[in-house]
Amino acid sequence: MAGTSSWNAPVACLGLAAFVGMLFRFPVLLRLMEEGAVSLLRAAPTVIGALLLLVASLGLLLRRPARGRLFAVSAAALLLGLWWLPTLVFSFWLWMAVLAALIGAVMGFGTARGRPAA
């Protein structure tokens, strides 16, 4: 298959596991928003990054070539969310999502440079 790699499934599973783990953190984020401790603007990058990671990971799981830009935007949004929301810095799932997004971005941009597909 053109553009696929043996790392697609592990990275996709890592991204999906991180998304599912982050689903457990979203109620805490919603509660903080309702209390006024966190504004919608500060929570938006985390939510958008998680949704982009979900789309990119599902694409990898369905044997689509890694989309470097999608993973890179997801990683940037998740890192911005980490920076803006200090309460989530110690969230294991958010760090795992950032790791999956960074690995996916490296895979996506690495195959675009002309490396032969597996």
Image (spheres, rainbow, N blue to C red):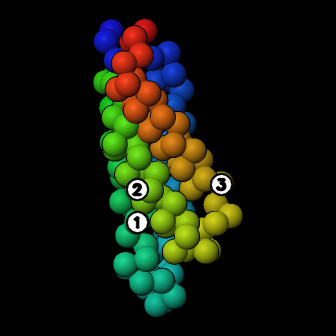
Image spot of residue 66 (x, y percent): 37, 29
Could you tell me if residue 26 is visible in this image?
no
Tag 2: amino acid: Gly
Q: Give neighbour class at mark 1: few <14, some 14-19, many 20+ (Cα, 10 Å).
A: many
Q: Give neighbour class at mark 2: few <14, some 14-19, many 20+ (Cα, 10 Å).
A: many
Mark 3 lies on a secondary structure that is helix
- Left or right: residue 74 compared with residue 29: left
Tag 1: amino acid: Pro
Q: Residue at 37%, 37% (x, y): give it.
A: 68
Displayed quadrant of residue 117: top left
Quarter of the image with the N terminus is top left
- Left or right: residue 83 compared with residue 36: right
State the residue position of label 2.
49
Q: Give neighbour class at mark 3: few <14, some 14-19, many 20+ (Cα, 10 Å).
A: few
> Mark 2 and mark 1 in contact (Cβ < 8 Å)?
yes
State the residue position of label 1.
45
Question: Observer-nearest residue: 28 or 18?
Answer: 18
Q: Residue at 46%, 24% (x, y): give it.
A: 8
Image spot of residue 3 (x, y percent): 34, 17
Q: Residue at 41%, 16% (x, y): give it.
A: 115
State the residue position of label 3.
92
Q: Residue furthest front?
A: 113
As drawn, 83 above or below 9: below
Mark with earlier residue (1, 3) = 1
> Mark 3 and mark 1 in contact (Cβ < 8 Å)?
no
How far, Cα to Cα, is label 1 from label 2?
A: 6 Å
